[in-house]
Image (cartoon, rainbow, N blue to C red):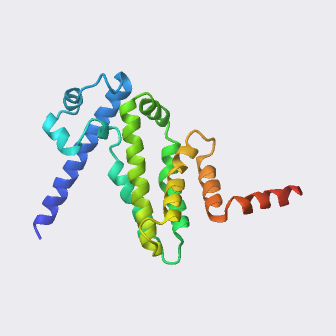
């Protein structure tokens, strides 16, 4: 029993150190550019050794996408741990509304996006990360729905869902954007189109 508080403190300290490193890295990258900042610069700003830095982050690119594992875990948990009776798409809609709308509305997002867009190494890393998330989500969807691991519908749904943050970025009302995209996923293009035409009398 006495071990539990010690482990808790240790984990909190590790998390705080990791966050401090990530914050220092992003601040330096935004100010000077990704290529002009060294790992040593980041370690000095975060007041840690380079050994400690690499214990938390396997690469310089990973410092920019510091929440990669957390994002993927939350995404798959949204499907696995959804309330009884809730469909997988509705579960993903709820996750998007609680997690992604806030990100799309973050005033720092434009600077972060610009940093990634102008840095080939970050664009490549981001694309690989996106595909890993898509594969992980597709796998959990197939598992939950009793489909084959390579089910095309699950793969397509996973990729569509992961486009939602991109579509919401820069929109006047990110929440309405998320709702519209998920309505389209649930009801389909044709029914949405028909409903709109019926409302206009065309």
Q: Is residue 81 visible?
A: no
Q: Picture quarter containing residue 139?
A: bottom left
Residue 168 coordinates in the image, percent (x, y): 57, 45
- In this view, 157 is above or below 62: below
Q: Is residue 197 visible?
A: yes
- The x, y position of residue 31, in whole percent, is 37, 24
Residue closer to the observer: 50 or 10: 50
Q: Position of residue 107 (x, y in %)?
A: 50, 36
Residue displayed at 76% across by 57% down: 193
- Where is 101 relative to 194, above or below? above
Q: Is residue 172 left or right of residue 161?
A: right
Give the tally of numbered discs. Answer: 0
Asked if residue 92 is positioned above or below residue 109 in the image, the reply reads below
Placement of the C terminus among the 4 image quadrants: bottom right
Q: Seen from this angle, which residue lies furthest right?
A: 201
- Furthest residue toward left: 2
Q: In screen coordinates, is 178 left or right of 119?
A: right
Residue at figure coordinates x 24%, y 30% from the top left: 42
Is residue 122 left or right of 42 when viewed as pictured? right
Q: Position of residue 73 (x, y in %)?
A: 36, 59
Q: Residue at x 12, y 71 (%)?
A: 1
Please state which of residues 60 and 175 is positioned toward the viewer in this rendering.
60
């Amino acid at each position: 029993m006495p071990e539990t508080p010690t482990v808790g403190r240790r984990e909190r300290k590790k998390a705080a150190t990791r966050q401090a490193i990530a914050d220092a890295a992003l601040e330096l990258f935004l100010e000077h550019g990704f290529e002009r900042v060294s790992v040593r610069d980041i370690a000095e700003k975060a007041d840690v050794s380079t050994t400690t830095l690499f214990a938390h982050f396997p690469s310089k690119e990973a410092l920019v996408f510091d929440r990669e594992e957390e994002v993927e875990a939350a995404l798959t948990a949204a499907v696995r741990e959804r309330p009884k009776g809730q469909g997988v798409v509705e579960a993903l809609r709820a996750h998007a509304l609680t997690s992604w709308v806030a990100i799309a509305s973050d005033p720092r997002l434009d600077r972060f996006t610009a940093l990634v867009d102008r840095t080939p190494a970050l664009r490549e890393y981001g694309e690989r990360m996106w595909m890993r998330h898509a594969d992980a989500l597709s796998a959990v969807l197939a598992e939950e729905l009793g489909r084959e691991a390579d089910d095309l519908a699950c793969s397509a749904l996973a990729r569509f869902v992961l486009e939602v943050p991109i579509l919401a970025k820069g929109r006047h009302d990110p929440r309405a954007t998320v709702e519209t995209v998920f309505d389209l996923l649930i009801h389909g293009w044709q029914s949405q189109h028909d409903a709109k035409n019926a409302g206009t009398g065309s």
